[in-house]
Amino acid sequence: MTRQPRTFVVFAFPSVHDTLAAEDALKRSGVPATTIPTPHELGELCGIAIRVEPGHASAAEEALVRGGAPASARAEITDL
């Protein structure tokens, strides 16, 4: 069975501390997320980013702002 590429929304942060705070904010809000290496498209940030399904992107952004951990960058990527 071959996995098909899918589109995801990725949020990046200036530091590992900020990324961990963002991950915690998403968990508290019930938004499913996965940490991944920061894609090159998002530039030189801390090296860890958070990936969410496109359908959860708005809820993720709201949770990040409410949690005091807004993203420094956002991009859509295609991944497996």
Image: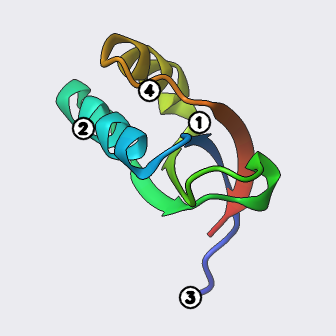
Q: Earlier in the sequence, mark 3 or mark 1?
A: 3
Q: Quadrant of residue 74?
A: top right
* Mark 2 or mark 4, whichever is nearer to me: 2
Query: For the C terminus, which image quadrant?
Result: bottom right
Apparent side of residue 19 relative to residue 38 in the rendered image (left or right) = left
At 56% across and 88% down in the image, what residue appears?
1
Q: Position of residue 8 (x, y in %)?
A: 63, 47
Q: Position of residue 79 (x, y in %)?
A: 67, 64
Within 10 angstroms of label 4, few (less than 14), some, or many (20 or more) residues? many
Check disc 1 and report the residue beneath it: 54
**Where 42 falls versus 72 (above or below)?**
below
Q: In the displayed orientation, state which residue is furthest to the bottom.
A: 1
As helix, strand or loop, the secondary structure at mark 2 comes to helix
At 24% across and 25% down in the image, what residue appears?
29
C-alpha gap between disc 1 and disc 4: 10 Å
Check disc 3 and report the residue beneath it: 1
Check disc 4 and report the residue beneath it: 60
C-alpha gap between disc 3 and disc 1: 24 Å
* Amino acid type shown at disc 2: Asp
Q: Earlier in the sequence, mark 1 or mark 4?
A: 1
Q: Earlier in the sequence, mark 3 or mark 4?
A: 3
Q: Position of residue 13 (x, y in %)?
A: 54, 40
As helix, strand or loop, the secondary structure at mark 4 comes to helix
Within 10 angstroms of label 3, few (less than 14), some, or many (20 or more) residues? few
Q: In the displayed orientation, state which residue is furthest to the left.
A: 28
**Where 26 falls versus 37 (above or below)?**
above
Residue 24 is tagged as 2
